[in-house]
Amino acid sequence: MDREVMMDKNREDACLCRIIHSERVEKARRTALQAPEYDRLANLFKAMGDPTRLQILLALSQEEMCVCDLAAFLNITESAVSHQLRMLRQLYLVANRRDGPVLYYRLDDGHITRLLDIGLEHLRE
Amino acid sequence: MDREVMMDKNREDACLCRIIHSERVEKARRTALQAPEYDRLANLFKAMGDPTRLQILLALSQEEMCVCDLAAFLNITESAVSHQLRMLRQLYLVANRRDGPVLYYRLDDGHITRLLDIGLEHLRE
DNA sequence: TCCGTGTATGAGCATATGCTCAGATATTAA
DNA sequence: TTAATATCTGAGCATATGCTCATACACGGA
C-alpha cells in the first residue's frame, strides 16, 4: 500500500479531511477548469438529463419540428414544451427559424447528436 | 406556409393540442425509443449535470483517486463525495478497485471521456 | 385594424436534488 | 479481539426543477 498520509500544507484554507496522495490532489488542482466552466458544462449535461428534453432532442435529430407538433408527440402542453425549448435554446442545444407564426426548431449543431449517440452507446455497452 | 392543420385521429387518447404536421409527429413516434431508455439516458446525462460530479469525473479522467483525495480536492466532506461516487458507480460512470482499506476510483470506460470532451468542445465552439 | 393562430412568459405548486450530520460497515495492524 | 483508518449509508433540511394555469406577445389574413 503506497500511501503517505499527510495534511495538506500547501493551501492556506487547509481542508478538514485527510489526504492520502497529496501529489494527486495537486495534479487535479493544476489541471482543473475554472469554476464557471464546470457550471456551463453542468448546465449542458443537465439540460440533456431529463426524459422530456431527450425526447425533444432525439425527435429534432430526425427532423425540425414546431412547438405544437412536439407537444402532440410528447403529449404534454405546448406551454411545457415552450419552457423546455427556451432552456434548450439559451444553452445552444437547439435553434429555430420562423416561417410566419410558426417557429421550427432543430438541433443547434453536430455536437448534440454526437453526445446523444455516445450516450446511447454507453447504455448498450 | 406548408401547414395542414388537423386533429390527430390516429390515437385513441387524442391529445388536447393542435397538430400542424401530423406526418412529422408520426415519424417522431415511429423512431422514438422506449420510455425506460429515455430514463436511463436521462440518468446518465443528469449524473454529468452537476459541477461537483463533473469535477470528480474530470479529475478521474487524469488519474485514479480515492475518496479522501477527492474530498480534499473538492473541499467538501468525504461523505458528500461518497454519496456522489455511489451514484456515479450505479450508473456505470466510474468503477473502483480496492487496495486494503482504500478504494481507488476511475472512469468506467472511454465513453465518459468522450462525452466530457465533446461537451467542452461544444462550450468553446 | 381586428381577429385567429402559434408561441412565449410569469407565478405557483409538488417533487427531486445535494449537502451535512450522525452513525454503521469494512479492512488492517497490534 | 481491539483499535484505527477509510469508506458507506440513512435521515433531514434548504434549494432547484418540471409542470400547469393564466396571460401576454408576434405574425398573417380579412
Image (cartoon, coloured by chain):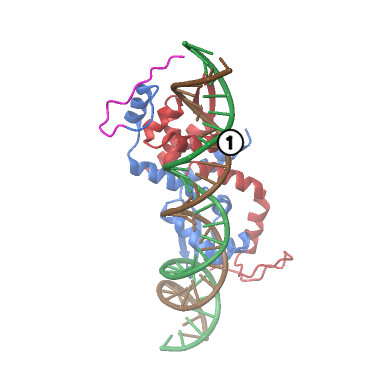
Chain colours: A red, B blue, C brown, D green
- Image quadrant occupied by the C terminus of chain A: top left
Could you say where residue D18 lies in the image, as x and y percent from the top left? 45, 44
Residue D22 horizontal side relative to residue A4, left or right: left
The dominant secondary structure in magenta is: loop
Residue A78 seen in this snapshot: yes
Q: Residue at x 54, y 22 (%)?
A: A97
Direction right: furthest residue: A12
Could you say where residue B16 lies in the image, as x and y percent from the top left? 35, 33
Identity, as a three-letter code, of the amino acid under mark 1: Gln
D22, above or below A96, in the image: below
A96, above or below B3, in the image: below
Residue A71 horizontal side relative to residue A26, left or right: left
Magenta-colored span? B1-14
Residue A33 seen in this snapshot: no
Residue bearing mark 1: A90
Whether the magenta-drawn stretch holds residue B4 is answered as yes
Q: Residue at x 53, y 62 (%)?
A: B81
Whether the magenta-drawn stretch holds residue A96 is answered as no
A11, above or below B37, in the image: below
**How many numbered tags mark residues here?**
1
Could you say where residue B108 lies in the image, as x and y percent from the top left? 46, 50
Q: Residue at x 53, y 26 (%)?
A: A96
Viewer-closest of A47 and B5: B5
Residue C20 horizontal side relative to residue B36, left or right: right
Could you say where residue D1 lies in the image, as x and y percent from the top left? 41, 88
Q: Residue at x 58, y 36 (%)?
A: A90
Viewer-closest of B101 and B2: B2
Viewer-closest of A78 and C26: A78
Direction left: furthest residue: B12
Residue B106 horizontal side relative to residue A124, left or right: right
Secondary structure state at the residue bearing disc 1: helix
